Image (cartoon, grey):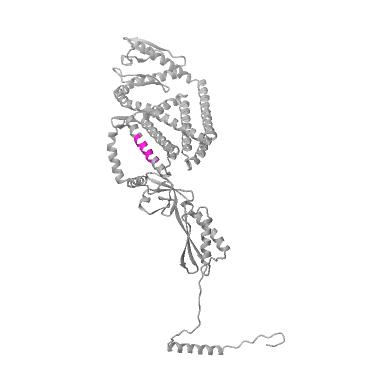
Amino acid sequence: MKFVSFVRVRIFRTLVLAFTVGCLLAVLPSLAQSNSNQSNSNQSNFNQTNSTASIMLDGRKIFEVTPSEQYSAQERAEYVNQVLQEQVKTAESPISVEIKDQQKIPVIEINGQHLVSVTSEDTPAGRTTQEQAEFWRKKLQTVIQKAQYERTPMYLIQAIVISMACVLLAIALSWVLGKLWCNWLKPQLEKDAAESAPLEGAKQPNSPKIAGQFLLGLIRCAIWIYALIYITNQFRQTRQLSRIVTDTLITSLTSDLIPLGDNSYSVLNLLILTGLFVGLILLAKVIKQGLRSRVLRFTGLSRSSQETIAVILNYAFIFITSLVLLQLWGLDISSLTVFAGVLGVGIGLGLQGIAKEFISGLVLIFERPIQVGDFVDVGGLMGTVEYINVRSTEVKTLDDITIIIPNSKFLESEVLNWSHHSSVSRLKIPVGVAYGSNLTTVRSALIDAAKEHTDVLVQPTPRVFFKGFGDSSLDFDLLVWISEPRKQFQIKSDLYFRIEVILRHRGVEIPFPQRDLHVRSGSLPVDISPQLVESLAQLSQSLAKWLDQQPTANPPQDGNGHK
């Protein structure tokens, strides 16, 4: 049941990811193809956009005006905005907005004061100036009523209550998302990883967990950004600033800033393209795992061959789909020739190390001097090869520590591969016994100890060699063959334990280092000069005279007066 559940989850994830990428491939390229047309239309409307100015009241955009014969659009907008602000501040009663004709030109007046004249340039096609004036009048009336209401204490209390409710709602949503992550999604991801680990034979990476935490953080940030924008729009003092920040952010994301080839792309387009590439890489990873665990496993190939095929297909899929994606996105690949030339120069100068590791990785993948699953010794680091990438190789040591080794080290230094072509390898167990031991007993004891171990192969049979006479022992080598090089240290330890027990049981002594020191008596011929003999004689006479001149001390007496 666990296997079926695991397969269902994997298939569901694969289908969802494939559907998402397919939708992006179907929708986003059309958006990219329209970039050029949109940029052209934006360019054609650039002068028109810059020739208009917005009429604003308390941060709300009402309409836009165009230049007249006497004034520019900015001058007209500044005058209208100033009049609106003064009328809203000073007027206590409702403000009247009326339309009057002056020389056949509709003029909008506010409380009898001239506000703006509606010209033919302000009127779009299919509408008269009178209709445009009436349209502006209604919008002005609505916005002015809102502005007057926002200056009342009742609205201020209402805005504060709404803002506090918005903050509380954002806190509640963040808390609910955290609870859903901790109590449902995170345990489910850990359960899936635990169930899939035995099937794939390796510890699963925690990339889904990291991706989930990152997505949770993005959702929380979006909630608080939206709450902040909504709160600032409730107050007229901050609405203008909020609008400026929002418009600047949207403009910076959607404006065509980066030219590539014949088209120009915005930051948002590049972000979407980057997300699409990430989706393709994730899809390639899912396909690679599916090939390795669902298809190649049943082909009967070795683990190293399966890994090689999966890696080659993975990089081929990424390369081909990247080219197709760039073409569908509207980016001319031929426009990247200059970039390719610069990249080639960078590889030749500053990226020599990366290029060296990349080429070494290709040599390892295709020539296969080492393969996934081999037990190797590289510079004193012993472990099992887990993955061979184009830049580095992952080796898991006997301490279950993963070490990342550059690929060039496998080609430039000596590598001891215990599993190359065959996993059967020979172990040498040196043993020393005391002089005078029965050699036949020693040989049979070593052979018996080897045959009793379950990891020692029956064929080839264990063998014993008499190396020679050592300083303190008779030296032997026990040769055994094993099929699991990774367990060689454990096998050696087990054999030594068993050898010691058998030798002690059969009366064979294992010696310790000994050294014999022989000392012989005799006289040493010493030649002394006459001057030295004369000096020693004079010194002896002087010492004797000095002792004679010293007073003799009274000897101690006992209680009876005897000395």
Q: Give the prevailing secondary structure in the magenta stretch.
A: helix
Residue 278 is left or right of residue 551, and the answer is: left
Report which quarter residue 97 is drawn in: top left
Q: Position of residue 496 (x, y in %)?
A: 52, 59
Is 257 a magenta residue?
no
Q: Nearer the viewer, residue 199 or 15?
A: 199
The C terminus sits in image quarter: bottom right
Residue at 49 percent across and 50 percent down: it is: 399
Q: Nearer the viewer, residue 265 or 549?
A: 265
Q: Nearer the viewer, residue 463 or 168?
A: 463
Residue at 50 percent across and 41 percent down: it is: 198
Is 316 a magenta residue?
yes
In the image, the segment drawn in magenta is 310-320
Badge count = 0
Q: Position of residue 161 (x, y in %)?
A: 53, 24
Residue 341 is left or right of residue 464, and the answer is: left
The N terminus sits in image quarter: top right
Residue at 46 percent across and 84 percent down: it is: 524
Q: Position of residue 427 (x, y in %)?
A: 46, 57
Q: Nearer the viewer, residue 77 or 87?
A: 77
Q: Position of residue 74 (x, y in %)?
A: 33, 22
Residue at 41 percent across and 45 percent down: it is: 304
